[in-house]
Image: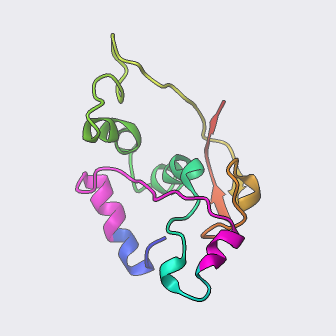
Amino acid sequence: MRAKHNQAVLWNALALGSIDTVGTDHCPFDTEQKLLGKDSFVNIPNGIPGIEDRVNLLYTHGVKGRRLDLDRFVDAASTRAARLFGLFPRKGTIAVGSDADLVVYDTNYRGVVSAKSQHVNTTTMVSKEWRLRAALRS
């Protein structure tokens, strides 16, 4: 979502570990709520929807896009975040005594992220369509 000229630098910093993890200011305001700021910028609710597919997009553009290897993807999406929030080693690792959250990842999945595909109450997205090349499976 950053300016095109900054994207390669950011991906490189994430791959090298200079950027620890990827997050979002997830706030799924609908169009009516965002219009609260139509007369004054200071009244616009902050944040955008998108946390639901953050990891899928990270895998799609990072691993499938050959910007991150699988180990760095797991580190950025789980391990490093657990360390930063003081949850490691209870979270963020697969080890005896840890409370691991394991997922099944479908690396052959093809889909599109849109406001309609979200489970949260939103009518808008930053992009009309984001193509996915992988997704978590339940």
Please say if 52 is above or below 85: below
The picture quadrant where one finds residue 70 is top left
| Number of marks drawn | 0
The residue furthest right is 116
Q: Residue 72 in magenta? A: no
Foreground of the two, 138 or 28 = 28
Inspect the magenta stretch and tell me whether residue 10 lies in it. yes
- Residue extending farthest left: 18
Magenta span of residues? 9-36
- As displayed, is residue 33 above or below residue 119? below
Residue at 73% from the left image edge and 64% from the top image edge: 123
Q: Residue 128, can we see it? A: no
Front residue of this view, candidates 79 and 62: 79
Q: Looking at the picture, does residue 24 appear above or below residue 7?
A: above
Residue at x-position 55% and y-position 29%:
103
Q: Nearer the viewer, residue 135 or 45?
A: 45
